[in-house]
Amino acid sequence: MSKLDTHQFAPLLKSKMSPESYRKLIALENEELFAFVGEFTEHCEPDSVYMCDDSDEDAEYIRQHSLLKGEEKPLTKAGQTIHYDGYNDQGRAPGATKNLVSKELVPLMGALLAKERNEGLAEVRQVMKGIMKGKQAIVKLSCEGPTRSPFSIACAQITDSFYVAHSEDLLYRRGYEHFRLMAPGERFFRFVHSAGRLDEHGNSVDLENRRIYQDMEDYIVMSANNQYAGNSVGLKKHAMRLAIKLAGTEGWLCEHMFVMSVQNEKKGRSTCFCGAFPSGCGKTATAMLPGEKIIGDDIAYFRNVNGEFRAVNVENGIFGIIKDVNAVDDPLIFKTLQTPGLEIIFSNVLTGPDNEPYWLGMGVDHPAKGWSYSGEWFEGKTDDKGVPIPHAHGNARYTLRLGYLENIDPAYNDKNGVPVQGIIYGGRDSDTSVPIEESLDWKSGIILKACTLESETTSAVIGKEGVLAPQPMANLDFISYPIGAYITNNIRFGEGIANAPRIYAVNYFLRDAKGNFLTNKLAKKVWLHWAELRIHNEVDAYRTPLGFIPRYEDLKALFAEIFQEEFSEELYRELFKFRIDPWIAKISRAVRFYHHSAPDCPEEYFEIWKSTAHKLTALKERYGHFIEPGTYSEK
Ligand code: SPV
Ligand code: MN
């Protein structure tokens, strides 16, 4: 007999769980976990509770029940399924998302979706009272980062959605064994999710009661009346917000970054880069560059491991945007999505009469009718305002295990992570930033490259698309403690490590006066290989007011070597001229943003932005509006 058998929740859990499920729960001898499952079973009132361990049988149970309940449907190719979120539940919902913090902290949170904790807890508990009636709750344990590693964070999810549990099985490492080996009292993140009341298609109906409330003191997230994975899957963006807060408290970093390695075959060298890009700025395309290797596409933890700046991909899979994945632009993912026998969940794409998935930008003709995120779909279908409804949603996704990808870096499971040598901040503008620039040092990289990132809003977030919004570290939606303190933690972490990575800013979207892109999509491979050579001290660079840019001859050699292509000096000069006025404007927008949205931002950072803007203004007298590459000097 376990001492948990006398716990206050033991009789309730025994009555709701099969003997086998109950046995799996108490075998962990984890009182906090037992109390968590008990408390929310009492509160959410599921009919029954199913406890998973790490077995394939339990994974199969979840897969089967997702099909039985209609949360997923099988597609023609073996292993593939389709899941639909409700018509108005196709992206993250910032309006319903709150970081619950103490009263004292609320005024410092600025742009960060904060709510007073006690008020928020009372509200979300009210919404979740009895919300799982008539359903089975699943308890699934997982681990963020490799298990039993310096990076691991154990996570417990309770959900009444088999699709959510299935997604977590594809995206994260199973964590039951990890829990079994945990020391008593070791911290874990806790997530409760309910899709709430469902309509005849199995979609959440009470969207006005959608809540995604993250308790930043107890590291619990409660998510109700939604299904889209960015709102429902605890281990993804909810855990990210909790980890950012925990990292800020403990002095490490959780960043919205891919992890990949650039392969220098000539030198037999693999160099790891991490990169933060707001949505729609080339993040996945960079992480998946042909010829390089991927470790992760979305979230990285950074820790100082024995004096080294090391990273892991938190996840074990990809929840990727499927729009524009086609044989030309994304051949590796496209091929994986066409391979029968792989366990892949498609979401919010069209399924045709052939029961195959069709998405936007697939490069293949789609059928004139079928089923989609708007229900029965036919060519010419419009919404109630007469606006055409496309056959698939712009934020439709695929979910798969990373191990399916041919270009996976074998280091992706290393418990000590990989040593990071370059960090990339990727923006999107047509007329301001050069394709690649190396920062002077870590701190100026954070203040001038990471903090000044901007992007246009995209369909990953519900709301208006195409609005220019500041995006500090491409992380604004996820920073969960005051922005000034977050920036300071970033600076301190890098400065505390002797060999911190170099920081690069990239921009793949410069255009000419007619609006045409100045470079093709694969040119980014050259910029990355230039950064790789810089890191290994094999190329020189020209100084600019904000850092270092490539010399023409080095890029010419790389274009020739990688693409057997001519790279003209004329194009080089156009791409790499320093554009003074747009940069002054960009810095002014940053100052305005931090002034209004980051009440705790230290004066010192404003001084850096302002003195940089003054310096640039003064440079106009010497150079005019543009500084030609190679002509700038500090004196
Ligand atoms: C993002 O929008 O940054 C994503 C997708 O990675 S979501 O999981 O919805 O956040
Ligand atoms: Mn993301």
Image (cartoon, helix red, strand yellow):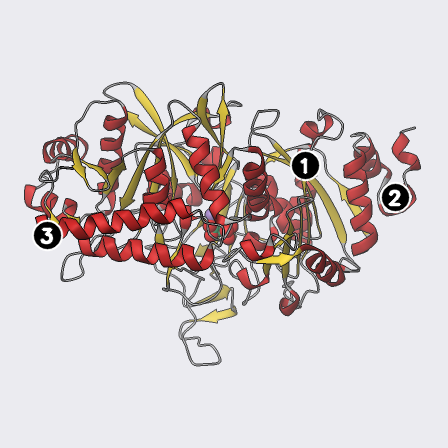
> Is label 2 within 8 A of ligand 1 (CB to nearest ligand atom)?
no
* Residue wearing tag 2: 9
Q: Nearer the viewer, mark 2 or mark 3?
A: 3
* Residue wearing tag 1: 188
Secondary structure, mark 1, is strand
Which mark is first along the chain, 1 or 2?
Answer: 2
Quadrant the C terminus occupies = top left
Give how far apart the Cα atoms at labels 2 and 1 are: 20 Å
The residue lying at 73 percent from left, 27 percent from top is 180
Please tell me how crowded label 3 is: few (under 14), some (14-19), or many (20+) other residues with Cα within 10 Å.
Answer: few
Give how far apart the Cα atoms at labels 1 and 3 are: 57 Å
Please tell me how crowded label 1 is: few (under 14), some (14-19), or many (20+) other residues with Cα within 10 Å.
Answer: some
Q: Nearer the viewer, mark 2 or mark 1?
A: 1
The residue lying at 75 percent from left, 30 percent from top is 185
- Horizontally, is 363 left or right of 180 in the view? left
The amino acid type found where label 2 is placed reads: Phe
The residue lying at 23 percent from left, 51 percent from top is 614
Instruction: Please provide percent x and percent y for residue 35.
Output: 81, 41
Instruction: Please provide percent x and percent y for residue 234.
Output: 62, 47
Q: Nearer the viewer, residue 547 or 269?
A: 547
Which numbered disc covers residue 621?
Answer: 3
- Horizontally, is 193 left or right of 73 in the view? right
Secondary structure, mark 2, is loop
The amino acid type found where label 3 is placed reads: Glu
